[in-house]
Amino acid sequence: MIQKPGWTYRYIEILGQYIAVNDKTGVLYTEDKTMYTPEECRLLEKRDFQLPEFVHRVKKVFNGILVQNTWD
């Protein structure tokens, strides 16, 4: 993933890819171009961004929205 100024990058082992969080907006993109809203990003941050891969795949396919406790 090409790193651009204004974004915070982190490798997420469970997904096997990098994420990028916009420092101003809080929007999160994964390396496979899946977008998470600032609200979703805040939920993921509480879990140290350890999103189960199956939840990520479902979001990517259906362009869904994560809500609290969807994978607990």
Image (cartoon, grey):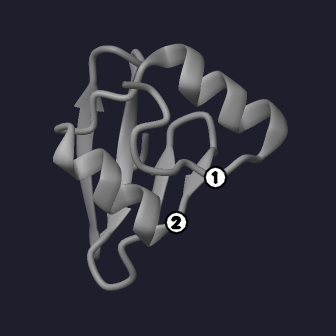
31, above or below 3, in the image: above
Q: Are marks 2 and 1 in contact (CB under 8 Å)?
A: yes
Q: Position of residue 64 (x, y in %)?
A: 72, 47
Of the residues shown, which amino acid type is indicated by label 2? Thr
Q: Position of residue 17 (x, y in %)?
A: 41, 25
Q: Read off the residue under disc 2.
A: 37
Disc 1 packing (10 Å; few <14; some 14–19; many ≥20): some
Identify the residue shown where x is 64% and y is 52%: 65
Q: Position of residue 27 (x, y in %)?
A: 45, 68
Seen from the viewer's position, the closer of residues 61 and 11 is: 61
Q: Read off the residue under disc 1.
A: 65
Q: Is residue 3 visible?
A: no
Closer to the chain start, of discs 2 and 1, is 2
Q: Is residue 19 visible?
A: yes
Q: Position of residue 16 (x, y in %)?
A: 40, 15
Q: Taking 21 as reference, is 48 left or right?
A: left
Of the residues shown, which amino acid type is indicated by label 1? Ile
Q: Taking 40 as reference, is 61 left or right?
A: right
Identify the residue shown where x is 80% and y is 31%: 61
Seen from the viewer's position, the closer of residues 51 and 32 is: 51
Q: CA distance from mark 2 to mark 1?
A: 8 Å
Q: Which mark is residue 41?
A: none
